[in-house]
């Protein structure tokens, strides 16, 4: 199983403000959709609640300490869309492992900041949209060592391309072994 963090991060490491993204980059939304469709995603409760709905064709493994938390799928949910609530990261990873045959062996870590931080030691890959601007916000992507993660891909985008209002890069990091 490959654990892959996927996030968009400002120059000052901000990834969110008031449980929302502080920017609108349509190409990044498309990147996220293309990468995560058909896969399992591990996320915290607040991240799940920030979504407009359960994302189609994905398994949402939600980590929360709220024992009675039970979000429901809409009646018109696309096949392959599912929700599983677990209390710990260990249980999230264990459950994801049982779903490989249905959702593939790449499991995405989709936030928020604390989930990224706690899962970084077991993360194999990072897809990071690096936004070349500072933004205000309380949620941040954790620092990671460039000796533990090696950059293997970078593709630059300019403001004005495909609706983007800021310059950014799509970057892939792989854990060095």
Image (cartoon, rainbow, N blue to C red):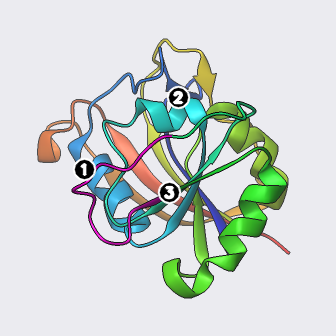
Q: Which mark is residue 171?
A: 3
| Image quarter of residue 43 | top right
Viewer-side residue, 13 vs 155: 13
Considering only vertical position in the picture, is 145 above or below 15?
below
Q: Are marks 2 and 1 in contact (CB under 8 Å)?
A: no
Mark 2 vs mark 1, CA separation in Å: 18 Å
Per the image, label 3 sits on a secondary structure element best described as strand
Magenta stretch: give its range. 71-82
What secondary structure is the stretch in magenta mostly built from? loop
Pointer 2 or 1: first along the chain: 2
In the picture, the disc for residue 80 is none
In the rendered structure, the answer to whether residue 34 lies left or right of residue 154 reads left
Q: Report the mark closest to the observer, 1 or 3.
A: 1
Q: What is the spatial separation of the Cα atoms under label 3 and label 2, in whole angstroms? A: 13 Å
Mark 2 burial class by Cα count in 10 Å: few <14, some 14-19, many 20+: few
Q: Which mark is residue 27?
A: 1
Q: Position of residue 114 (x, y in %)?
A: 72, 33
Q: Relative to the observer, which residue lies in front, 103 or 24?
A: 103
- The residue pinned by badge 2 equals 11
How would you rate the neighbour count of disc 1 (Cα within 10 Å): few for under 14, some for 14-19, many for 20 or more?
some
């Amino acid at each position: 199983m490959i654990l892959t963090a996927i996030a968009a991060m400002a120059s000052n490491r901000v990834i969110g403000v008031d449980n929302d993204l502080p920017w609108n980059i349509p190409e990044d939304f498309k990147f996220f959709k293309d990468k995560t469709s058909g896969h399992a995603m591990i996320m915290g409760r607040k991240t799940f609640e920030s979504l407009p709905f359960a994302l189609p064709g994905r398994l949402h493994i939600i980590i929360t300490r709220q024992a009675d938390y039970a979000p429901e799928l809409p009646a018109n949910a696309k096949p392959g869309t599912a929700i599983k609530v677990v209390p710990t990261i260990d249980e999230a990873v264990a459950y994801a492992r049982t779903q490989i045959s249905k959702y593939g062996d790449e499991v995405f870590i989709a936030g928020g900041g604390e989930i990224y931080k706690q899962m970084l030691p077991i993360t194999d890959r990072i897809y990071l949209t690096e936004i070349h601007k500072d933004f205000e916000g309380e949620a941040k992507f954790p620092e990671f060592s460039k000796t533990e993660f090696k950059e293997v891909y970078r593709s630059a985008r300019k403001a004005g391309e495909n609706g983007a209002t800021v310059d950014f890069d799509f970057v892939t990091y792989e854990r060095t072994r």
